[in-house]
Image (cartoon, rainbow, N blue to C red):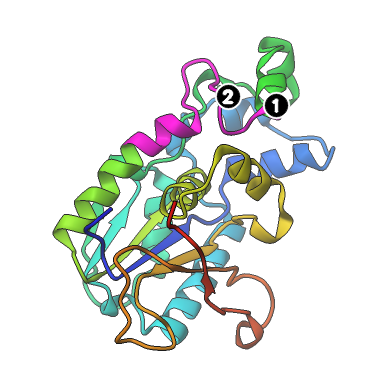
Amino acid sequence: MENLPNELVLVRHGESQENFASYRHERGESITNAETIFNVPNWKHRLNSTGIEQAKLAKLWIDSKMGGLAVFNALYVSPYLRARETAIYISDESDNKWLVDDRISEKEWGQYVEIPPPYREEVFPTVKNHVDASRFWSRPPGGENVPDTILRLKSYIDMIGNKHLGQKVLAVTHSGIMRSTRYYLEQMRPEEYEDMIKDPAQEIKNCSILCYTRVNPLNHGDIRPMMSWRKLIDPTNGDQSSIDDRWVEFSNNR
């Protein structure tokens, strides 16, 4: 990680049809048309009306707090439809040039997510136990675990570091990629990753914005060799003027 952009901003896509159904299942509520929803390939899930509104709120925050997309030297997006739709809604009137990169597509859950949530344990009786035991190491049938995801993510970060050294980069992606980015850039250990995903304060909600910088927010002449400050924003949570957007410095010298 010797070459890096000065700033990297990751935006999770807005709520999708599949997200809405999964959230209902997690709350113990019934899912209507579950077979129809989960019969769609994962990459084809579209934003629902809530997701569209979330993306519009993300655009408001990016415009008001970061100066809009025009301040970025490069814009990347996952090939999944829900990410590409989110990119459209956070775009401005100008001709934003989004580059599609397969390496920032969602962590692959394989056959597990092709089954509606109420029936997953019946079809794959051991997978949930493995996932519950370790979200870091578990690998569903036909899917990836976190180390698998990090291999392709590292390739992406190496590329933007070489291509956009000292610049600003924004990407619309997925929660799995954003958590893997935290693990990689913050040089976590597996148990720290497990703790992170269990912490509600660190949840990556739909249209959350994860920002990294190696430029000291309090002293722009202090530029570190590695990303050293992070902030996680939920622009959909209440009055945007009251959103806590303080930078957190983290240690990455292991």
Q: Which dot marks residue 133?
A: 1
Residue stretch rendered in magenta on the structure: 132-151
Question: Looking at the image, is 84 positioned above or below residue 233?
Answer: above
Q: Tell me the element at label 2.
A: loop
Cβ–Cβ under 8 Å for marks 2 and 1: yes
Question: Looking at the image, is 98 positioned above or below residue 180?
Answer: below
Task: Decide if residue 31 is on the left or right side of residue 20.
Answer: right
Crowd tier of the residue under label 2, counting other residues whose Cα lies within 10 Å: few below 14, some 14–19, many 20 or above = some
Residue 236: image location, x then y, percent: 62, 70
Spatial separation of the CA atoms under disc 2 and disc 1: 8 Å
Query: Residue type at mark 1?
Result: Ala
Tell me the residue at 24%/56% (across/down).
2
Q: Main secondary structure of the magenta part?
A: loop
Is 142 one of the magenta-colored residues?
Answer: yes
Report the front residue among 90 and 106.
106
Residue 194: image location, x then y, percent: 64, 41
Determine the image quadrant of residue 224.
bottom left
Determine the image quadrant of residue 99.
bottom left
Give the residue pinned by disc 2. Answer: 138
Tell me the residue at 52%/27% (across/down).
109
Crowd tier of the residue under label 1, counting other residues whose Cα lies within 10 Å: few below 14, some 14–19, many 20 or above = few
